[in-house]
Image (cartoon, grey):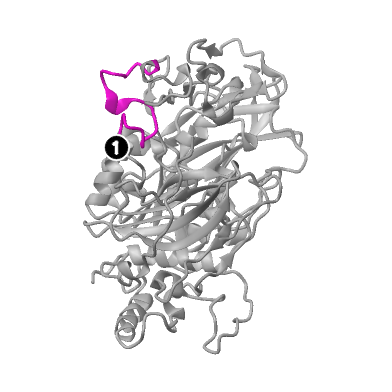
């Protein structure tokens, strides 16, 4: 057993004590492990009676980590939107998705008419539940009217906008409005740049601050490629245009196949999908004193070797669009013993490419033609992607498509299956696997055989198990949940892990809403749905990360004891 720098000495002592205890008890008996999992407030008592309800809590990882020390700084709720403000009057984007301390980030800001505004930068974390820390502010700036995009009115006054009629790529091409210096003492994290016009209008520009020299235990990936794929600013996304959202992504005639990072995000007041999913994971990680740094899809694609500097690659939320270099790099990392934790679903579904913008700046355009070897209509022909047939390994199709023949389950253990609509109140339970020999990850989280977890933890997109010859050997099922998808078909959603031949553990939550069980914060003015935290999901997630920080962790039983026959998932589309 190797000690991780992540684990406090007290937990290490309990960990060794538990190794001895595990040799004396049957694995299906819930041991007294409150020291390892901190609190198991949902655990059953020895008599079988439910434990009394306790406040939601988390497992502390490392009280001396940089993130733990950072979150002891004074926090504020001023990063949130004021109620009732306009979130479209002033808009902006950054000239890079991430930056290093000491760098200067160009910001491009525009408003309906020129106005005075203030700019404040907040680091997002726990901060005793307040959620943010003010890092930098400029109170008196003056905006330019370079154009805006409004959902109902379209592009207004954007004389500089570049629109490609073939690819439907839209580049705002604004002039630099402000150059933001990244402080030398700003630690890695997710930062929201808040633009405020008095109490009338507010919006965000997201930015990740990296630390490429760090050897922190965990590297947290923020899925900016997927943020941009769904970004409808200017009228087009990889899914449709403002007047016609493509059903089932069947026609390239009504969607873009190239989208630019040189434009604001239309969703969630400019914050993209961060306030929908990823903020919950970030708040939970930082509340847990995790020793982590942050990165993005773009940075992993640019230099995948950076993943090798960490013990865990943790993919947050909904990470659907991967480049070849990212897929190659993550698979290589797994094969070198780096643990992978996917806290979402529908990950690594489309291959995409990163390309320069019209000014030659690298990685500012996301390309995905969404072609198929079995096209449903002429717009999906492989020849529509210029890389076909000369470079079939770069064709932007699904990873499972025969052109690439790299189905997601060969890496994740599972693959995206389908989704359901929660608009009618349908939210199926996540169901803990049944059987006599439950995995210790489940048992020590205080979860029981067949337990149902509601509160919007499962969905709305989910992963399933496929029998296509690529599922890793000894895949361990933690949860298997009956679901009725949007097509009225009954399927099963899964949460699983497996141990690769290198020793790396790969966990797939199999649910985009997994983070809802970790944190129930709802930002002001952002309609992210209603959900509630779940102590068992928090404990289970903590157990998974703890297990990944040790070699030969006793949290695992023989995987073959947990493999029950399961139905094959029906491919979608």
For residue 560, side relative to residue 174 (left or right): left
468, 293: nearer the viewer: 468
Q: Residues within 10 Å of mark 1 (few under 14, many from 20)?
A: few
Q: Using the rendered view, name the quadrant where residue 323 is placed.
A: top left
Q: Is residue 573 visible in the rendered structure shown here?
A: yes
Query: Which of the 4 image quadrants contains residue 9?
Result: bottom left
Is residue 482 depicted above or below 360 in this figure? below
Residue drawn at point x = 35 percent, y = 47 percent: 409
Q: Position of residue 382 (x, y in %)?
A: 37, 20
Q: Main secondary structure of the magenta part?
A: loop
Residue drawn at x 29%, y 66% is: 4
Residue 402 lies in what quarter of the image? top left
The stretch drawn in magenta includes residue 399:
yes
Query: What percent of the width, then of the height, locates residue 344?
Result: 48, 49
Rendered location of residue 32, percent (x, y) = 44, 84
State whether residue 389 is above or below residue 431: above
Query: What residue lies at 48% left-to-right and 75% top-to-bottom?
Result: 38
Span highlighted in magenta in the image: 384-404
Look at mark 1 in the image and give the residue it sits on: 303
Image quarter hosting the N terminus: bottom left
Residue 384 x/y as whole percent = 40, 16
**Badge 1 element:** loop
Residue 75 in the magenta stretch? The answer is no
Of residues 61 and 557, the one nearer the viewer is 557
**Left-right relation of 483 to 306:** right
Q: Judge by depth and name the residue closer to the eye, 100 or 569.
A: 569
Q: Is residue 187 visible?
A: no
């Amino acid at each position: 057993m190797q000690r991780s720098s992540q684990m406090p000495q007290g937990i290490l002592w309990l960990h060794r004590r538990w190794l001895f205890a595990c040799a004396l008890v049957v694995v299906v008996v819930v041991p007294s492990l409150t020291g390892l999992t901190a609190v198991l407030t949902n655990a059953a008592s020895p008599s079988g009676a439910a434990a009394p309800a306790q406040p939601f809590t988390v497992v502390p990882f490392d009280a001396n980590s940089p993130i733990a020390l950072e979150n002891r700084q004074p926090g504020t709720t001023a990063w949130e939107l004021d109620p009732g403000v306009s979130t479209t009057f002033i808009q902006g984007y950054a000239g890079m998705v991430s930056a290093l301390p000491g760098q200067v980030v160009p910001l491009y800001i525009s408003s309906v008419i020129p106005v005075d505004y203030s700019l404040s930068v907040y680091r997002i974390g726990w901060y005793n539940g307040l959620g943010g820390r003010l890092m930098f502010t400029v109170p008196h700036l003056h905006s330019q009217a370079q154009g805006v995009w409004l959902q109902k009115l379209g592009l207004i006054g954007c004389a500089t906008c570049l629109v490609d009629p073939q690819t439907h790529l839209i580049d705002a091409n604004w002039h630099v409005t402000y150059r933001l210096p990244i402080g030398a003492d700003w630690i890695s994290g997710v930062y929201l740049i808040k633009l405020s016009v008095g109490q009338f209008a507010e919006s965000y520009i997201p930015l990740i601050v990296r630390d490429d020299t760090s050897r922190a235990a965990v590297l947290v990936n923020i899925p900016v490629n997927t943020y941009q794929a769904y970004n409808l600013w200017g009228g087009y996304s990889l899914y449709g245009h403002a007047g016609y959202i493509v059903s089932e992504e069947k026609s390239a005639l009504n969607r873009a196949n190239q989208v630019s990072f040189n434009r604001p995000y239309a969703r969630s007041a400019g914050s993209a999908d961060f306030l929908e999913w990823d903020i919950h994971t970030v708040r939970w990680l930082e509340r847990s004193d995790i020793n982590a740094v942050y990165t993005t899809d773009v940075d992993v694609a640019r230099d995948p070797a950076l993943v090798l500097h960490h013990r865990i690659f943790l993919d947050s939320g909904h990470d659907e669009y991967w480049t070849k270099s990212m897929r190659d790099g993550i698979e290589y990392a797994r094969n070198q013993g780096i643990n992978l934790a996917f806290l979402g679903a529908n990950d690594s579904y489309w291959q995409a490419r990163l390309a320069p913008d019209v000014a030659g700046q690298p990685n500012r355009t996301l390309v995905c033609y969404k072609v198929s070897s079995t096209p449903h209509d002429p717009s999906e022909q492989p020849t529509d992607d210029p890389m076909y047939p000369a470079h079939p390994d770069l064709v932007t199709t699904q990873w499972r498509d025969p052109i690439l023949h790299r189905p997601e389950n060969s890496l994740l253990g599972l693959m995206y299956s389908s989704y359901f609509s929660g608009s009618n109140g349908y939210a199926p339970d996540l169901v803990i696997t049944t059987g006599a020999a439950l995995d210790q990850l489940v048992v020590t989280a205080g979860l029981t055989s067949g337990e149902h977890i509601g509160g919007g933890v499962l969905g709305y997109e989910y992963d399933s198990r496929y029998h296509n010859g690529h599922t890793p050997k000894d895949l361990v099922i933690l949860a298997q949940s009956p679901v009725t998808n949007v097509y009225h078909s009954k399927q099963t959603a899964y949460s699983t892990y497996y141990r690769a031949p290198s020793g790396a553990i790969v966990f797939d939550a199999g649910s985009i809403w997994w983070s809802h069980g970790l944190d129930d914060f709802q930002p002001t003015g952002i309609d992210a749905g209603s959900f509630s935290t779940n102590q068992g999901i928090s404990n289970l997630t903590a157990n998974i990360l703890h297990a990944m920080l040790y070699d030969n962790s006793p949290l695992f039983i023989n995987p073959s004891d947990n493999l029950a026959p399961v139905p094959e998932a029906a491919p979608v589309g």
